[in-house]
Amino acid sequence: MRTIFLFLAFFCVFGNAFAQMLPGAKPEVAPMADSTGKPILMDFSIKLTGIKDANMPYSVFSSRPLMVYYYSPHCPHCQKGYPGVQQLAREYEQKGLTAITISVGNVNRRDILMFMEQHNASLPFFQDAEQEFGKKYGDGYVPRLYLVSPDGKVTRYTSTDSDGLKDLRVDIDKLLGIKK
């Protein structure tokens, strides 16, 4: 009985991550909504700490198309996914998309700076020191991408591999009104 319980607990915690690794698995793309189906809006009053500019408020990114990369500097998947995310951000910057990164709260600033240096990062970096962003928008896994419309509606992307970025690219094009 204990073995069955442990298996079920393990599957509940890691099942989603393993399912997405299966060949042909489609990454989850989900507009975020509450239990009534009402869209969840981005809360730009969440206290985030700027890494290079500690005084930069998160609120300066409201009312514009925004892509958020939520990550941990210690996560191998986050390290692998960041270059593609940064490339996508650079590609769409001139078309009106702003991109930022938010680190999970339980890491020190030095680790974030090291991540930035290793990846020659050019995006604004924040830390969710009080873990408000993670509690409100996270699902317990990293990396995660969020696309936020100017009216604050949030869509979460669970994959930063090439297929996940293709889905994100299609949605960015729609958000920015780019016809292809």
Image (cartoon, rainbow, N blue to C red):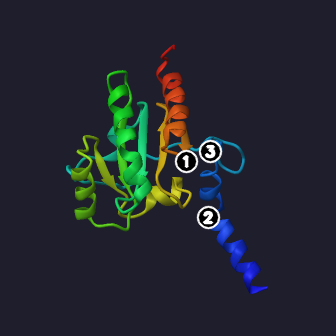
- In the displayed structure, would residue 24 be above or below residue 132? above
| Image coordinates for residue 141, horizontal then vertical, percent | 52, 59
Dot 1 and dot 3 residues touching (CB under 8 Å): yes
Q: Residue at x 62, y 67 (%)?
A: 13
Numbered tag placed on residue 158 in the rendering: 1
Q: Which residue is mark 3?
A: 28
Tally of numbered tags: 3
- What is the three-letter code of the residue carrying label 3? Glu
Residue 147 located left or right of residue 54:
right
The secondary element bearing badge 1 is classed as loop
- What is the three-letter code of the residue carrying label 2? Phe
Q: Is any part of residue 16 visible from this angle?
A: yes
- In the displayed structure, would residue 82 be above or below residue 65? below
Residue at the far right: name it.
Answer: 1
Q: Residue at x 28, y 58 (%)?
A: 112
- What is the three-letter code of the residue carrying label 1? Thr
Numbered tag placed on residue 166 in the rendering: none
Dot 2 and dot 3 residues touching (CB under 8 Å): no
Q: Which residue is mark 2?
A: 14
Q: Earlier in the sequence, mark 1 or mark 3?
A: 3
Residue closer to the observer: 61 or 110: 110
Residue 162 located left or right of residue 116:
right
| Image coordinates for residue 84, horizontal then vertical, percent | 39, 39
The secondary element bearing badge 2 is classed as helix
| Image coordinates for residue 136, horizontal then vertical, percent | 52, 56
Q: Earlier in the sequence, mark 1 or mark 2?
A: 2
Q: Residue at x 49, y 28 (%)?
A: 172
Q: Residue at x 39, y 33 (%)?
A: 88
Residue 48 located left or right of residue 176:
left
Residue closer to the observer: 57 or 169: 169
